[in-house]
Amino acid sequence: MFRKILLTFSLICQLAFSSEVISQVSDTTLANFYIHRSTDFVLVNNDSVFYYGEKALSLSRDINYKKGEAASLLNVGAVIFDAGNQSLGLQYILKAKHIYEEIGNEDGILASYLSL
């Protein structure tokens, strides 16, 4: 319980700070920020994982940031899979794996397999 409270407080502080500097960062950095926010909420709130994952996915696609697109697909796919829609979640995860293979990211490929 204490861990969740501490994590929530930390995220609130980080989000308050980040809103001031978001306009000063590159698109890739912002996509990575959303990916990390998405990952931070994995044990806390699946809605937040989905929210930040979708923001990261949209931005990554807009700027053609393949690594960010794959990471976002993996996060969102895992949430969808865990929520009970295994078919759609699997599509996201496999698409992430395919992108990781295209860019030669072995850690991402492994993470994709571990998400299944």
Image: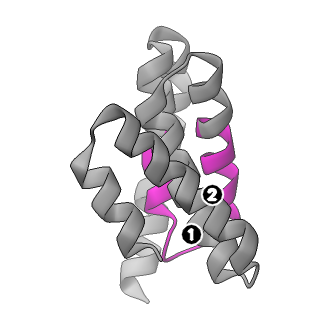
The answer to whether any part of residue 46 appears in the image is no
Magenta: predominant secondary structure element? Answer: helix
Quarter-of-image position of residue 59: top right
Circle 2 residues within 10 Å: few <14, some 14–19, many ≥20: many
Q: Position of residue 109 (x, y in %)?
A: 33, 55
Circle 1 residues within 10 Å: few <14, some 14–19, many ≥20: many
The answer to whether any part of residue 98 appears in the image is yes
At horizontal 57% and vertical 51% (from top left) the residue drawn is 95
Which image quarter holds the N terminus?
A: bottom left
Q: Nearer the viewer, residue 33 or 93?
A: 93
Residue type at mark 1 is Ala
Q: Nearer the viewer, residue 4 or 29?
A: 29
Q: Position of residue 115 (x, y in %)?
A: 44, 73
Q: Is 47 a magenta residue?
A: yes
Residue type at mark 2 is Tyr
Q: Nearer the viewer, residue 100 or 21?
A: 100
**On screen, residue 85 above or below 109:** below
At horizontal 50% and vertical 70% (from top left) the residue drawn is 42
Q: Which residue is mark 1?
A: 78
Quarter-of-image position of residue 76: bottom right
Q: Position of residue 61 (x, y in %)?
A: 62, 26
Q: Which mark is residue 92?
A: 2
Quarter-of-image position of residue 46: bottom right
At horizontal 54% and vertical 75% (from top left) the residue drawn is 44
| The furthest residue to the left | 106
Q: Tell me: 51 left or right of 101.
A: right
Magenta segment boundaries in residue numbering: 34-56
Label 1 SS: helix
Q: Tell me: 87 left or right of 8.
A: right
User: Between marks 2 and 1, how big is the CA–CA gap?
Assistant: 8 Å
| Cβ atoms under marks 2 and 1 closer than 8 Å | yes
